[in-house]
Amino acid sequence: LTGAFLCGKAAAQAMVERGRGGRIVNVSSINALASEPQCADYNASKGGLHSLTRSMAIDLARHGITVNVVAPGWIRSPMSAPYLTEDILSGRQTFNLVRRVGEPEEIGGVVAWLADPDTTYVTGATIVVDGGQTAMLPMPTTVDFR
């Protein structure tokens, strides 16, 4: 959280001095929205980043600076690799609506859209990129309602 604060502050100061507005995009996690067991420190830090994003959006709006946060779900990365079992990777274990792990490029596309100079009406927002994971209740994978 300290790093995001200091980077955001430095970026905002440069944007204000330049006088042309700008975009700040933070990257968090769906753990800010739904807490995971045994991850209190991680969950709290992600929740703090969402609050920081909203606070910065309020303070920087008058300078034409938008501030948003992207909240990814399971994304294929070195951090998630130890947890991505064959059942998850094959889609046999359902943890989201699209039945697959997201790719880094899918997060990059959302960040690029938020950073676009034409995206001026989105600020203080959380954009969830999780394949619909937070849209559904956790269900045992053995339940078949067909």
Image (spheres, helix red, strand yellow):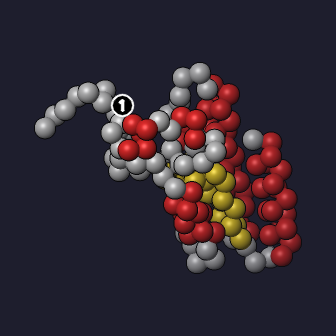
Q: Against 116, is 91 above or below?
A: above
Quadrant occupied by the C terminus: top left
Quadrant occupied by the N terminus: top right
- Measuring 80% from the left and 76% from the top, which residue is drawn there? 19
Q: Nearer the viewer, residue 57 or 3?
A: 3
Does 40 sit left or right of 132 as displayed?
A: right
When asked about the image quadrant of residue 144, the answer is top left
Q: x, y percentage for residue 8?
A: 77, 55
For the view shown, which residue lies furthest in the front direction? 86
Label 1 secondary element: loop
Does 19 sit left or right of 104 as displayed?
A: right
Task: Please say whether residue 54 is visible from this viewpoint.
Answer: no
User: Callout 1: 10 Å neighbours few (<14), some, many (20+)?
Assistant: few
Q: Nearer the viewer, residue 140 or 91?
A: 91
For the view shown, which residue lies furthest in the left direction? 146
- Measuring 53% from the left and 48% from the top, which residue is drawn there? 75
Q: How many marks?
A: 1
When asked about the image quadrant of residue 50, the answer is top right
- Measuring 38% from the left and 44% from the top, which residue is drawn there? 90
Q: x, y percentage for residue 36?
A: 53, 28
Q: Residue at label 1?
A: 138
For the view shown, which residue lies furthest in the top direction? 38
Q: Against 63, is 2 above or below?
A: above
Does 36 sit left or right of 140 as displayed?
A: right
Q: Against 69, is 96 above or below?
A: above
Q: x, y percentage for residue 14?
A: 85, 68
The kind of residue on which mark 1 rests is Pro
Q: Nearer the viewer, residue 29 or 52?
A: 29
Q: Against 82, is 91 above or below?
A: below
Task: Please say whether residue 39 is visible from this viewpoint.
Answer: yes
